[in-house]
């Protein structure tokens, strides 16, 4: 119990007297995961929608694969990206390893299956309602997919939040490709891991509470925006 | 693209035969109402004609065209409104056909004006009442200037005022030369609109008769029984 109350105090103290160092870590966490989700969504939403609307061979197999990859271990993704970006790797010449960009790439790969699988489900549910009408109006599969993304935008925003939650909470991938370099690639989760291994449990837990508060805040904000933009029952 | 010919069309779903050997000829400018008891296959027949379902046997032929024409539209019992403005919904069919957005919106506005829905143009379509939605759906279909319009019980779930307005819209389109094929359960509506009655029973065409003759003296036993049981 002592550790818990101490960590709670540590969290409050961190937030109240937070220095630029802490804010830097928080800001980097937000930035890395935000870019990752945007990057992944740019591919995952169209992919999910086309998978829902299209009728092609291998569609079921792809769906099962995507659903399976939703639980992809972060360290495996981290390791793969590490191998790709390391000096000797195929993308080594870009010199991206141990940069925030590398962390965003790793997180984007991590959340891509999650975003694609969930958006496929959302779009497919809508498609069962819309299919006849859209085909009757003459929409091609591509046009239908785009229309369905536009029409399910509020449900899809929840999907994006789920992706953001997964990205900002993971530690394995950013640890490997970012390297937890103080002031450069240290984010909330890698800081927590470091403090834990140093034995400063209150600080580690305090950071964890800050992270939790942050995720809650982002979700509340998104929810507020959603209600405001929908402007009614829908 | 006319006449629309159904040549021995059959349709089965999961081993259940829904349509049997349907032969049918729809000529340009006609107004055919499909009547029949529930489960007779009326909606399926219309979807096969419109091209939403492929027949499992027989052929659907559009004059001497090799493929189904794009100049057709369909109204469903429950219209699906897209989550955008009424104007956006009405322009949608034109946009997916490649009409530039600005031009599509202008033409959609003209149609809304003509059917007296101009005041709803900027409203979100999904919050309209069922009757208003169906009128918007009819405007959406009309914007495409279809040469043939299919309607599947378009007034089954709307109030009498909306029904009158929708019937007037259908009559106007027919008057302007659009071929109309419609399913309804409303005999009064069939009397008001139909030139020909196609009676479907158990997936088979019992008869296809000019409407006045049908209501006076149907040729088939099934249709006679149907008329006796239905309320006017």
Image (cartoon, coloured by chain):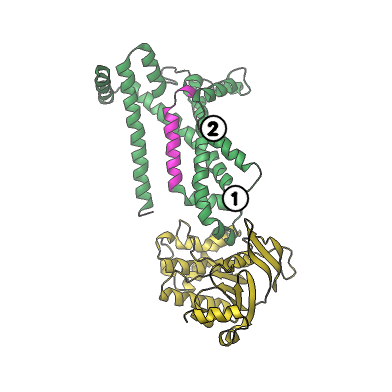
Chain colours: A green, B yellow
The image quadrant that residue B99 belongs to is bottom right
Can residue B137 be found in the magenta stretch? no
Determine the residue positioned at 58% across, 19% down: A86
Q: In this figure, what is the number of numbered marks?
A: 2
User: Mainly helix, strand or loop, the magenta region?
Assistant: helix
Asked if one can make out residue A98 in the rendered structure from this viewpoint, the answer is no
Q: Position of residue A3 (x, y in %)?
A: 27, 17
Asked if one can make out residue B141 in the rendered structure from this viewpoint, the answer is yes
Is residue B152 positioned above or below B189 on the image? above
Q: Describe the element under mark 1 as helix, strand or loop.
A: helix
Q: Which residue is mark 1?
A: A142
Determine the residue positioned at 50% across, 70% down: B154
Query: Which image quadrant: the N terminus of chain B?
Result: bottom right
Q: Position of residue A41 (x, y in %)?
A: 51, 39
Q: Which residue is mark 2?
A: A69
For the residues marked 2 and 1, what is the alpha-carbon distance in whole angstroms?
25 Å
The image quadrant that residue B203 belongs to is bottom right
Which residue range is magenta in the image?
A154-173
């Amino acid at each position: 119990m002592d550790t818990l109350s101490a960590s709670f105090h540590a969290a409050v103290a961190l937030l109240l007297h937070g220095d630029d160092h802490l804010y830097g870590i928080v800001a980097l966490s937000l930035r890395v995961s935000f870019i990752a989700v945007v990057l992944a969504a740019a591919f995952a939403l169209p992919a999910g929608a086309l998978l829902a609307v299209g009728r092609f061979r291998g569609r079921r197999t792809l769906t099962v694969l995507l659903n399976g990859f939703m639980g992809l271990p972060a360290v495996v993704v981290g390791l793969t990206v590490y191998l790709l970006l390391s000096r000797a790797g195929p993308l080594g010449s870009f010199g991206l390893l141990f940069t925030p960009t590398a962390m965003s790439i790793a997180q984007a790969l991590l959340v891509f299956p999650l975003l694609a699988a969930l958006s496929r489900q959302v779009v497919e549910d809508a498609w069962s309602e819309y299919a006849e009408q859209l085909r009757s109006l003459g929409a091609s599969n591509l046009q239908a997919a785009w229309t369905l993304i536009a029409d399910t935008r509020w449900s899809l925003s929840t999907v994006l939040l789920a992706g953001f939650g997964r990205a900002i909470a993971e530690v394995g991938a950013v640890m490997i490709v970012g390297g937890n370099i103080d002031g450069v690639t240290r984010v909330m989760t890698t800081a927590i891991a470091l403090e834990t291994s140093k034995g400063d449990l209150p600080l580690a837990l305090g950071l964890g509470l800050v992270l939790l508060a942050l995720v809650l805040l982002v979700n509340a904000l998104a929810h507020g925006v959603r209600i405001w933009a929908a402007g009614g029952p829908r | 693209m006319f006449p629309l010919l159904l040549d021995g069309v059959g349709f089965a779903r999961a081993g259940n035969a829904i349509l049997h050997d349907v032969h049918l000829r729809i000529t340009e400018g006609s107004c055919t109402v499909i009547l029949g008891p529930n489960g007779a296959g009326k909606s399926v027949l219309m979807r096969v004609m419109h091209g939403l379902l492929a027949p499992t046997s027989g052929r659907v032929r559009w004059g001497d065209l090799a493929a189904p024409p794009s100049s057709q539209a369909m109204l469903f019992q429950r219209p699906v409104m897209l989550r955008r403005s009424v104007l956006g919904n009405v322009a949608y069919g034109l946009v997916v056909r490649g009409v530039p957005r600005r031009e599509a919106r202008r033409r959609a506005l003209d149609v809304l004006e003509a059917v007296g829905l101009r005041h709803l143009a900027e409203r979100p379509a999904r919050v309209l009442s069922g009757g208003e939605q169906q009128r918007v759906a009819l405007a959406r279909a009309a914007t495409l200037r279809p040469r043939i319009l299919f309607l599947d019980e378009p007034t089954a779930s709307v109030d009498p005022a909306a029904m009158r307005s929708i019937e007037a819209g259908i009559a106007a389109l027919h008057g302007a030369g659009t071929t109309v094929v419609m399913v309804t359960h409303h005999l009064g509506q069939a009397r008001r609109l139909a030139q020909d009655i196609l009676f479907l029973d158990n997936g088979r065409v019992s008869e296809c008769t000019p409407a006045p003759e049908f209501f006076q003296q149907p040729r088939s036993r099934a249709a006679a029984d149907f008329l006796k049981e239905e309320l006017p």
